[in-house]
Image: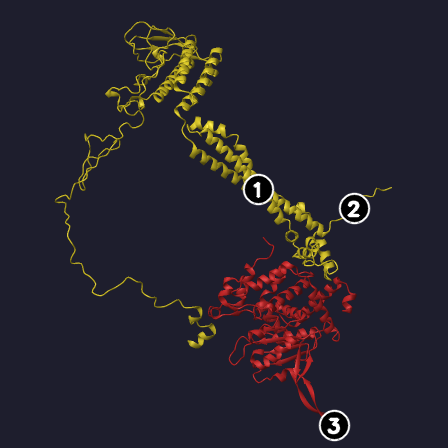
Chain colours: A yellow, B red
């Protein structure tokens, strides 16, 4: 008993060509789809990550997209992904239809097996689509096939004995992937350009809120106590409130005042103990040793502050360390700046706005002795100019017009509190420089920092300038009429037969 | 047809290859070199066409034709064309003869009544005489005094012409050139070929050509093989390729190449396409195939079309040859379906 293995029938040339046709169509469709699929995937992947990217860009570069723009961009990305996906699908369908051709597949097979168009010829005689059609079909029916068709069939079988469509036609998706990746890169590049073009610097409130959130994060990291967490939460809430454009400035200021009070309550046990002996020197210094949040030994910060009370404030740091001290100092500074900004924006010329009650929040140093919890001036490094910043609507002293501290705080124009206050004023001609006349030399004129450059135009011709206006009456004139019309071509381009070229056979005779 | 019905297609193809190869080898025993020319001559014979052979005197044109005829067992006649040659000298004439006491006209057949006719220096005869030969080539019959005589198949004309000493000649009109299937140009032999020619022709031994058929069966066998040539399959893309070539060679046509429009006055006629296909079929059969390939068509391009392109004055002045133009066509024409 021997088991009879079924012998797999060898596929005929027609079956092989049909298989090659299907394979080629599948490959073409897949490649076409990849062209659209890669950018679509890229767009779909980037769309949800757009918000973190925007936050990162805002924190890293200071530029970020507004929320509506961000939403529009995300919608655009998804739409682009859908469009490229649809285009890829459409092109895949078209590629399938084009590649699903029996004769073309036979020609490809013919080239691979080097059959010198014998497979192609066989395909034209056995095209199923043509023979199944009407009498107009080019392919002959079985009965009307040529007498030499059996030889053609045998030779085709010989050529295709070892032919396999799967082996002969591989997907080779490397190139389509590269092209698709190029399209993906193009989408990313367009997105980057769009973000750069649409990105705007954050508003002062937003920047302030961002800094507050960063501080909240830092506080949570460095002092994971209950009070620290509460402070961080309060900071986040304040940041949210600051960013809300619908809230009135009064409410924001109130919230800031509450936060400042909270900070004052939290601060003494954690950071500093302040002594405020009655001394008129108004000079504060702090020095302390303590363990930092990381367990190291920190050196006490030192600073100088200028208080309006004229009292001497001496502070010794004995808190948790340098990091906390700096955080608190920075936090106070930020809160102070936020208050100031809100006040500036909410009350230009409006003196009826209630001033915050919290001590030290008006930029001046706290009066010594009022509260033992008040931070000493030692923790406000180099902000004397800010603390002395005049209120809107108040006349600043003349010495402050230059805007010390690098900020535009000086304001001598009561009608406006923003921008260049000197616009509209014609400058007085004091200390002006003049340009040199032609031929005149001297030290270089420095106009780099000039705000206005005044030109003096001469009222008339300069006497003795060397020029003289005369009427040219002696100009020669043509006695005969003339025109500037172009001359007619003397010789037109000769046509080939008019060149009188001599054929080689007559050249010797003519010579 | 009876023999064709008995033998299988494989045997018929094998017979064709055998006959062609043996004829080629037999002619090669006499003619040194010129293998391509010999092959084209035999190809034209099996295609049922005629050949115009161009070459300077003394290259063996006449010997080649005569040898081919002898090898194939066909009758052979030679006509030397001169200016005073009359059409009746070619086709024959009625002469008055006395038969059993009665005088009557009898047709005296001319040299055109042979299987293989060599018209030597055909451009030296007057157009009237040339047209007599060319009419017979096309119609395969002659009419003398109202009586039509059919020429026995296979009727095969080989005309030679000399490219030099053109004074006093009558160049063949383009319409008559078109009736030749091929124009074969024979060049000078190479030095080693010349040495072999000297050995064969000046020695004591003379080789006598052996017919590859029985002389009585030769015409029928050749006609049968000609039928086989017609049965070779041409795929539709190949036909489109040939049509594309003809269109590319037609000046001013939609598919004409710029050089063609610049240097040609007229392009090939449909006879050119027929010549291409037929020659390609013979070429395919010679390689054991029953279908035509692109290479077969390319091989037939120059001999089939070179005499069908009429150059203009500019081409003659700039010495642009039809061969160079056809070379451009074969390089630049696109094959259908090939990306």
Quarter containing the N terminus of chain B: bottom right
Q: Between tags 1 and 2, which lies in front?
A: 1
Circles 3 and 1: CB distance less than 8 Å?
no
Q: Is residue A270 above or below residue A244?
A: above
Distance of mark 3 from mark 1, alpha carbons?
Answer: 98 Å
Q: Position of residue A480 (x, y in %)?
A: 22, 66
Q: Between tags 3 and 1, which lies in front?
A: 1
Q: Is residue A161 visible?
A: no
Q: Which residue is mark 2?
A: A7
Residue B92: image tag: none
Q: Along the horizontal axis of the image, is B14 left or right of A222?
A: right
Q: Based on the displayed image, in which of its 4 quarters is residue A86 positioned?
A: top right
Q: Based on the displayed image, in which of its 4 quarters is residue A201 positioned?
A: top left
Q: Is residue A255 above or below residue B14?
A: above
Question: Of helix, strand and loop, which one carries label 1?
Answer: helix
Question: Of helix, strand and loop, which one carries label 2?
Answer: loop
Dot 2 and dot 3 within a common chain: no
Q: Nearer the viewer, residue B268 or B205?
A: B268
Q: Between tags 2 and 3, which lies in front?
A: 3
Q: Is residue A351 above or below residue B221?
A: above
Q: Is residue A262 visible?
A: yes
In the displayed image of the protein, which residue is found farthest to the left? A464
Q: Position of residue B18 (x, y in %)?
A: 72, 66
Distance of mark 1 from mark 2, alpha carbons?
Answer: 43 Å
Badge 3 density bin: few <14, some 14–19, many ≥20, Cα 10 Å: few
Q: Which residue is mark 1?
A: A88
Q: Which residue is mark 3?
A: B101
Q: Based on the displayed image, in which of its 4 quarters is residue A116 positioned?
A: bottom right
Q: Nearer the viewer, residue B291 or B37?
A: B291
The subunit carrying tag 3 is: B
């Amino acid at each position: 008993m021997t088991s009879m293995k079924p012998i797999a029938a060898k596929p005929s040339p027609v079956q092989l060509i049909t298989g090659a046709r299907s394979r080629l169509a599948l490959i073409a469709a897949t490649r076409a789809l990849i062209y659209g699929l890669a950018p679509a995937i890229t767009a779909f992947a980037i769309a949800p990550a757009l918000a973190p990217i925007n936050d990162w860009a805002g924190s890293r570069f200071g530029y970020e997209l507004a929320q509506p723009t961000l939403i529009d961009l995300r919608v655009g990305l998804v739409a682009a992904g859908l469009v490229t996906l649809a285009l890829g699908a459409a092109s895949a369908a078209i590629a399938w239809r084009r590649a699903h051709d029996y004769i073309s597949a036979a020609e490809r097979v013919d080239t691979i097996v080097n059959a010198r168009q014998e497979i192609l010829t066989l395909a034209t005689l056995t095209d199923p689509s043509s023979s199944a059609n009407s009498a107009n079909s080019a392919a002959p029916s079985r009965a009307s096939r040529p007498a030499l068709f059996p030889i053609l069939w045998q030779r085709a079988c010989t050529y295709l004995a070892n032919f396999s469509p799967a082996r002969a036609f591989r997907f080779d998706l490397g190139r389509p992937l590269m092209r698709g990746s190029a399209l993906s890169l193009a989408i990313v590049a367009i997105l980057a350009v769009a973000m750069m073009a649409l990105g705007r610097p954050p508003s002062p409130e937003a920047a302030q809120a961002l800094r507050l959130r960063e501080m909240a994060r830092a506080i949570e990291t460095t002092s994971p106590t209950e009070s620290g967490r509460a402070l961080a939460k309060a900071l986040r809430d304040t940041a949210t409130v600051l960013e809300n454009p619908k809230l009135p400035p009064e409410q924001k200021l109130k919230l800031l005042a509450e936060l400042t009070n909270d900070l004052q309550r939290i601060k003494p046990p954690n950071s500093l103990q302040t002594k405020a002996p009655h001394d008129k020197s108004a000079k504060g210094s702090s020095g302390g040793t303590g363990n930092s949040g990381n367990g190291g030994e920190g050196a006490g910060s030192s600073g100088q502050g200028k208080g309006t009370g004229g009292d001497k404030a001496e502070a010794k740091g004995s808190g948790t360390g340098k990091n906390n001290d700096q955080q608190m100092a920075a936090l106070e500074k930020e809160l102070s700046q936020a208050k100031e900004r809100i006040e500036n924006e909410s009350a230009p010329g409006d003196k009826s706005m209630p001033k915050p009650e919290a001590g030290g929040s008006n930029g001046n140093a706290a009066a010594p002795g009022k509260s033992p919890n008040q931070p000493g001036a030692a923790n406000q490094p180099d902000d004397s100019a800010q603390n002395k910043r005049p209120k809107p609507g108040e006349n600043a002293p003349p010495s402050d017009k230059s805007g010390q501290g690098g900020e535009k705080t000086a304001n001598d124009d009561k009608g406006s509190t923003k921008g260049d206050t000197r616009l509209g004023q014609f400058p007085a001609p004091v200390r002006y420089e003049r340009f040199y006349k032609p031929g005149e030399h001297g030290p270089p004129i420095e106009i780099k920092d000039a705000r206005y450059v005044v030109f003096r135009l001469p009222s008339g011709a300069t006497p003795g300038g060397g020029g003289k206006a005369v009427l040219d009456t002696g100009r020669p004139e043509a006695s005969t009429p003339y025109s500037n019309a172009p001359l007619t071509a003397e010789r037109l381009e000769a046509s080939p037969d008019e060149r009188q070229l001599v054929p080689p056979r007559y050249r010797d005779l003519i010579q | 047809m009876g023999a064709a019905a008995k033998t299988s297609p494989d045997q018929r193809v094998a017979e064709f290859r055998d006959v062609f190869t043996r004829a080629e080898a037999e002619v090669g025993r006499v003619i040194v070199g010129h293998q391509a020319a010999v092959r084209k001559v035999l190809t034209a014979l099996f295609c049922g066409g005629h050949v115009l052979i161009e070459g300077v005197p003394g290259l063996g044109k006449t010997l080649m034709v005569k040898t081919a005829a002898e090898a194939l067992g066909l009758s052979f006649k030679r006509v030397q064309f001169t200016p005073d040659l009359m059409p009746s000298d070619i086709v024959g004439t009625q002469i008055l003869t006395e038969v059993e006491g009665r005088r009557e006209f009898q047709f005296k057949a001319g040299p055109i009544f042979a299987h293989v006719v060599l018209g030597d220096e055909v451009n030296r005869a007057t157009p009237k005489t040339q047209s007599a030969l060319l009419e017979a080539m096309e119609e395969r019959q002659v009419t003398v005094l109202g009586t039509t005589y059919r020429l026995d198949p296979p009727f095969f004309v080989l005309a030679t012409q000399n490219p030099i000493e053109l004074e006093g000649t009558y160049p063949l009109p383009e319409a008559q050139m078109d009736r030749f299937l091929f124009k074969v140009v024979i060049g000078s032999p190479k030095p080693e070929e010349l040495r072999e020619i000297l050995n064969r022709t000046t020695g004591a031994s003379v080789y006598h050509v052996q017919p590859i058929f029985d002389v009585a069966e030769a015409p029928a066998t050749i006609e049968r093989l000609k039928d086989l040539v017609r049965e070779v399959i041409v795929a539709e893309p190949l036909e489109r390729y040939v049509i594309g070539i003809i269109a590319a060679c037609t000046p001013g046509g939609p598919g004409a190449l710029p050089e063609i429009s610049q240097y040609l006055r007229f392009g090939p006629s449909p006879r050119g396409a027929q010549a291409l296909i037929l020659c390609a079929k013979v070429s395919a059969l010679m390689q054991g195939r029953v279908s035509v390939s692109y290479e077969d068509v390319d091989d037939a391009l120059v001999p089939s079309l070179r005499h069908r392109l009429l150059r203009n004055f500019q081409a003659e002045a700039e010495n642009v040859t039809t061969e160079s133009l056809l070379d451009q066509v074969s390089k630049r024409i696109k094959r259908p379906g090939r990306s």
